[in-house]
Image (spheres, rainbow, N blue to C red):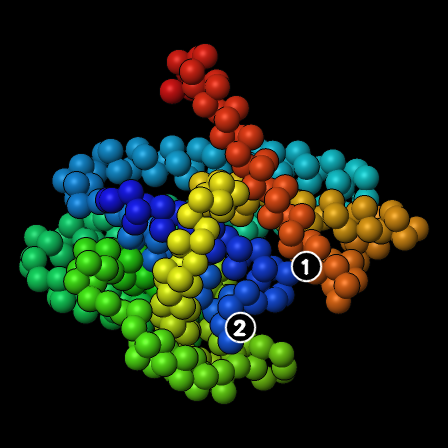
């Protein structure tokens, strides 16, 4: 992978995490692309962009790296948030999560990842692990049958398209939930792989005609947007963690595709201006830590606002985990503070980890 493309991917990761955090604050950074309409598909797409062909013949290395990069930090965070949740419960009287048990600590993370409310965005990490391992084995099997990239593309498109009706035709049990999410996400992983290997250097998909076509298509999709009228469904948004697509069948796929294109287009435009901004590069390098910690930072900001205004912290317990104080006035302040704090906290964590790796071989 060339250095420029690698840096562009890093900026794309930074944009993706900005979209996730802004979505949890219920506003959109990209106009007619609503929160929850494509952000997670974008992360799966990025994972596909970074998938290397050598892993098809080196399964052990791939699995080992995914365990070290995804699962090991996940369970350290799981332990941390268990302790934080216990502490908050002692201070406020509300336990933000499921009862502590062996199942909820080790099994629930792979089922829905909502064992602790403050770390629930990390459900994506365990799903990404399952998706990438499954993708590797299916891709290997497809390669043994046919080397034709369009055969592969057709197969993964079919998986993605079938995921949504599966959620309507079958009872969404914990196992079926994993199946549906994995089917849906593998399509975007392969799409990222397909883009990197067959489109990026061969076709220009960022011409004015492409821009016009995507803008018109998303404008038409907007007619399906009912996100601001909950009685009529969630519109362009979908809740992948629970396989909730409401009455939509194809719209979640289309709006994810238009959102991914818009993100790539945005990075293409902005890259010359942001490539030397260290904060952006650092943000792209620590998306895992931002994903893990942003709800905790928002919780702390809310506690500070409540204290300043003489409101007891117990008021926080009367709302869900995404509730913030006076959103009309404070949303963007929450956003800025959260991104700065979580980014630099992530940078500090990485520096500390590298220090210990250098000093103690046990961490290598």
Q: Secondary structure at mark 2?
A: loop
Separation of disc 2 and disc 1 at Cα?
15 Å
Residue 100 appears in which quarter of the rendering? top right
Q: Residue at x 29, y 42 (%)?
A: 3
Vertical placement of residue 129 versus 222, above or below: above
| Residue furthest to the right | 310
Side (left or right) of 362 relative to 99? left
The one nearer the camera, 355 or 333, is 333
The one nearer the camera, 155 or 281, is 281
The one nearer the camera, 276 or 355, is 276
Disc sitting over residue 353 in the figure: none
Q: Residue at x 58, y 84 (%)?
A: 232
* Residue 263 in sight from this viewpoint: no
* Residue 143 in sight from this viewpoint: yes
Dot 2 crowding, Cα within 10 Å, few <14, some 14–19, many 20+:
few
Residue 64 on image: x %, y %: 30, 33
Q: Residue at x 52, y 81 (%)?
A: 225
Vertical placement of residue 93 versus 203, above or below: above
Which quadrant of the figure contains the C terminus?
top left
Residue indicated by mark 2:
31
Residue indicated by mark 1:
332
Q: Earlier in the sequence, mark 2 or mark 1?
A: 2
């Amino acid at each position: 992978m060339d250095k420029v493309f690698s840096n562009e991917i890093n900026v794309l990761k930074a944009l993706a995490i900005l979209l996730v955090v802004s979505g949890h604050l219920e506003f959109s950074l990209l106009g007619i692309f609503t929160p929850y309409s494509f952000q997670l598909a974008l992360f799966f797409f990025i994972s596909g962009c970074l998938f290397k062909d050598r892993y098809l013949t080196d399964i052990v290395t791939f699995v080992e790296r995914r365990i070290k990069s995804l699962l090991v930090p996940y369970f350290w965070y799981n332990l941390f948030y268990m302790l934080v949740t216990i502490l908050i419960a002692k201070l406020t009287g509300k336990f933000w999560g499921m009862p502590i048990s062996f199942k909820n600590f080790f099994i629930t993370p792979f089922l829905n990842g909502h064992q602790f409310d403050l770390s629930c965005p990390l459900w994506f990490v365990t799903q990404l692990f399952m998706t990438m391992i499954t993708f590797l084995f299916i891709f290997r099997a497809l390669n043994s049958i046919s080397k034709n990239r369009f055969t592969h593309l057709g197969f993964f498109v079919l998986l993605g398209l079938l995921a949504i009706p599966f959620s309507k035709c079958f009872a969404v049990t914990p196992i079926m939930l994993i199946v549906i999410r994995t089917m849906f996400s593998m399509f975007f992983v392969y799409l990222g792989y397909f883009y990197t290997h067959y489109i990026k250097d061969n076709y220009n998909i960022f011409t004015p005609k492409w821009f016009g076509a995507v803008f018109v298509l998303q404008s038409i999709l907007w007619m399906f947007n009912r996100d601001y009228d909950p009685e009529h469904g969630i519109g362009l948004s979908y809740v992948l963690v629970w396989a909730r697509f409401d009455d939509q069948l194809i719209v979640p796929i289309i709006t994810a595709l238009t959102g991914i294109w818009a993100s790539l287009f945005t990075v293409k435009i902005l890259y010359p201006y942001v490539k030397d901004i260290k904060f952006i590069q650092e943000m792209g390098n620590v998306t895992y830590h931002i994903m893990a910690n942003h709800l905790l930072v928002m919780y702390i900001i809310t506690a500070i606002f409540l204290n300043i205004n003489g409101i007891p912290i117990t008021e926080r317990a009367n709302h869900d985990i995404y509730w913030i104080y006076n959103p009309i006035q404070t949303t963007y302040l929450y956003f800025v503070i959260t991104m700065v704090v979580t980014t630099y906290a992530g940078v500090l964590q990485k520096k500390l980890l590298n220090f210990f790796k250098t000093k103690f071989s046990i961490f290598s």
